Image: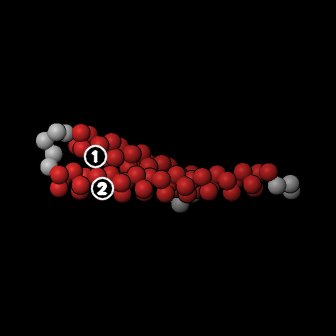
Amino acid sequence: MSKETKKEIESLSFEKKIEKAKELLEKLSDSKITLSDSLEVYKEGIKELEEAQKLLDEAKLIFTKEDKNLAEPF
């Protein structure tokens, strides 16, 4: 798999995780949600956001390495 294809897949995963977190936030905003359900939704939302943050950190590391490679003289 090429680096570009891998980045595209990770990007889609990131977007899906953010979208899922937004959906979960909407569920938490529902006044009819029970306390036990809200705790489960909250935990799932935190998990999605942590995974999205991990993807961002990995992307940052890749870009940092690429910048260093471009900045080094031949």
Task: Describe the element under mark 1 as helix, strand or loop.
Answer: helix
Q: Is residue 23 visible?
A: no
Q: Position of residue 34 (x, y in %)?
A: 14, 49
In the rendered image, residue 11, in percent from the top left (x then y), is placed at 48, 48
- On the image, the x and y values in percent for residue 47 come to 36, 57
Residue sitting at x 32%, y 47%:
20
**Left or right of residue 52, residue 1 in this image:** right
Q: Earlier in the sequence, mark 1 or mark 2?
A: 1
Whole-Å distance between the Cαs marked 1 and 2? 8 Å
Quadrant position of the C terminus in the picture: bottom right
The colour mode here is: secondary structure
* Residue drawn at point x = 49 percent, y = 57 percent: 54
Q: Is residue 61 above or below residue 25?
A: below
Tell me the tag on residue 44: 2
Residue 49's disc number? none
**For the residues bearing labels 1 and 2, Cβ distance under 8 angstroms:** yes
Camera-side residue of 16 and 7: 16
Say which residue label 1 marks: 24
